[in-house]
Image (cartoon, rainbow, N blue to C red):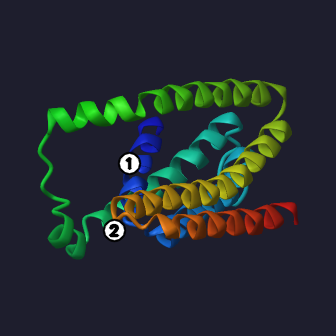
Amino acid sequence: FGPLFVLNTALLSFWIGRGKTIFVTVTTIGCSLLNMVLDPILIFGTFGFPNLGVAGAGLATGLSQLILSGVLFIAFFSKENRLKFSTTNYRFDRELFLEAVNLGLFQAISLFVQYSAWSFFFRVMGQTSQEHLFISGFSQTILYLFGFAIEAVSKAAAAIVSNLIGARRYDLIKSVYRAGIRLHCILGVLVGI
């Protein structure tokens, strides 16, 4: 399931770049909620499912990411996007690819280290007990739920500010900043509840 995280990031970037943060937020929240439901079912073996322990936690996350991929693919290849953005015209552009690698290489390395640490952590939790694994997995899902929303706001703000800079509308950048701060405060209050 590992490559799905990369695929989903790329597909979510398409929507974020278009300023469709509500779609990104709703789909990632849905994915996180599905993971929260599947975790106890697959870790502890309820509703007729076998007790899978650590493998159940991984399977729950993988299945929720697979469903997210399906939703994103269907939306990406919709008739509207095929006509407006030529989403089915996928030829390899070496120059563009190298530019993207150059821009994202350090973030990719950072994410690799982060996911490696999470994998190690969950392995230790799984060897400790199923209860530790469940609590850790549930906590991670909550972290991802709010993390995705915060990341979506950040990416949307970056896209909007980039467009404003390109349009030389520097006067509107402060309002984007203030709106982002307000949204982050609202999300912070929600996390605190």
Considering the numbered disc 1 on the image, is that residue within a helix, a strand or a loop?
helix
User: Between residues 26 and 106, which one lies in front from this camera angle?
Assistant: 106
Left or right position of 104 against 114 = left
Q: Residue at x 72, y 50 (%)?
A: 143
Q: Residue at x 58, y 47 (%)?
A: 61
Local crowd size for mark 1, using a 10 Å CA cut-off: few (<14), some (14–19), many (≥20): few
Which quadrant of the structure image shows residue 110? Answer: top right
* Front in this rendered view, residue 28 or 85: 85
- Reading the image, the residue beneath label 2 is 75
Say few, some or many: other residues with alpha carbon within 10 Å of mark 2 (under 14 / 14 to 19 / 20 or more).
some
Horizontal and vertical percent for residue 66? Answer: 45, 52
Residue 188, numbered circle: none
Disc 2 or 1, which lies upstream in sequence? Answer: 1
Residue 79, above or below 30? below
Evaluate whether residue 71 shows in this view: no
Residue reaching furthest to the bottom:
80
> Which residue is painted at 80% across and 67% down in the image?
190
Instruction: Answer above or below: position of 59 versus 128.
Output: below
Residue, disc 1: 10
Q: Residue at x 41, y 64 (%)?
A: 164
Q: Is residue 116 depicted above or below 40 in this figure?
A: above
